Amino acid sequence: MSEQGSERQKRSEIDRRKFVLHSVGLGAGALTLSRLPKARSRRNQQAAGTPLVVTSHSNETGGEAMRQAWEILDGGGTALDAVERGANVIEVDPEDSSVGYGGLPNENGVIQLDASIMDGRTYNAGAVASLENIKTPSSVARLVMERTDHVILVGIGALEFARSFGFQEEDLHTERSRAAWLRWREEHSDRDDWGPPDHLRNLPSPGPDGRDANRDANSGATGPGTNSGLVDQPLDFHYGTTNVLAVDSNGDISGITTTSGLSWKVNGRIGDSPIIGAGLYVDNDIGAAGATGRGEDVIKSCASFYIVLRMGQGRTPQEACEDACELIVQKYRNVNPNFFPSEKFVAVNKAGEYGAASMGNNRGRPRMTVRNAESLQVHEGTTLYTG
Ligand code: GLY
């Protein structure tokens, strides 16, 4: 055999061994997976589902969104229709600077919206990213889910898709959002998003003067007046976003996450909201989770998927949201122990339990609006790590 031939034979022997090893790994995985459906079908028999709908918005618009979403659930409608209705109410609110119409723009003054939707019943998902000129991106995301074999459409493609379904293009700026951007542009330079990521900057700790302290995971989501002062006070970075999660009387679960994303973001930046597993995740046998806050952390930690996974392992929604905060803090511990980002997580499970947790935003406990058969109420979760 030539030297080349023997070399090839050696390589194929190594490849074969690698394959055998890999197959053993796969076999073990397959064994674990094949057990899952049985465990899950037992869960299904236990809980048909307790209807509720929640949003991470706790202001008046959040309350109105939950009232309208509950009407659908109460009338026997689906979780999918309920979350879309709820999200639309928040998206079209001109006073809300974190979502849809009147959202804060990118560095060029252009409002680019991200949204995702997931339907637990059909294990289907859709999303749009960097969508311009359409007030209700979550409805476009729903059409991506239902009318294409894709999950995410971005930019001009998403806009053309929306137009083809009859969505009207509109200027998404309000007087307020435009004035806020003009003011930011006059003042920015050392507070923009160019340069290394936040957690690698040489900050002793997030504090009153720290850049991170200026970023608010709950922007537009914690109460009336949260967005006031956009024009006449020092300008903050805003990660404001909303999640709407619902369980219907059939026990089917759906969720939406929708946002105008980080204010003054680098043109083309996409956050966690349109990324399934990051800003949103739904499992019809378990529950749903959504994220607001610094999307970069949520993407790296696949936080919403992780929360649902933890609930599947027996954690309550509250505990699972706290687990996600813990996961992120642990990851940063070796890199910058003083870095506590500003995420907020909300979750529900099939049994109608709910929870919220946040960290590092120095703005009190995270709130969410909850509507179930008992009441419409603002619930406070827990804050871990205030930095
Ligand atoms: N969580 C919203 C964003 O980072 O864009």
Image: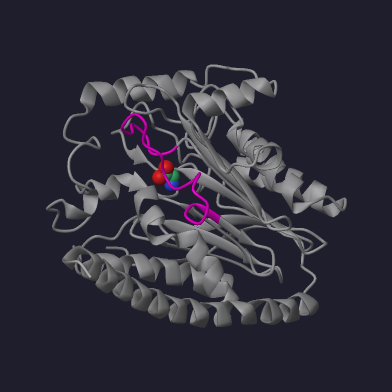
Which segment is the magenta one?
A: 261-280
Q: Position of residue 332 (x, y in %)?
A: 25, 64
Which of the image's four quarters has the C terminus? bottom left
| Left or right: residue 186 compared with residue 345 | left
- Does the stretch in magenta take in 267? yes
Q: Position of residue 301 (x, y in %)?
A: 39, 61
User: Which residue extends farthest right?
Assistant: 75
- Does the stretch in magenta take in 265? yes
Above or below residue 47? Residue 158 is above
Picture residue at 29% right of the left edge, 26% below the top: 184
Picture residue at 23% right of the left edge, 21% below the top: 186
Picture residue at 52% right of the left edge, 22% below the top: 172
Q: Position of residue 163 (x, y in %)?
A: 63, 20
Q: Predominant secondary structure in magenta?
A: loop
Front-most of residues 300 and 240: 300
| Left or right: residue 299 compared with residue 256 | left
Above or below residue 307? Residue 361 is above
Which of the image's four quarters has the N terminus? bottom left
Q: Position of residue 75 (x, y in %)?
A: 87, 50
| Left or right: residue 33 compared with residue 82 | left
Is any atom of residue 207 visible in this view? no
Front-most of residues 372 and 377: 372
Picture residue at 49% right of the left edge, 44% below the top: 241
The quarter of the image that holds ligand 1 is: top left
Above or below residue 371? Residue 142 is above
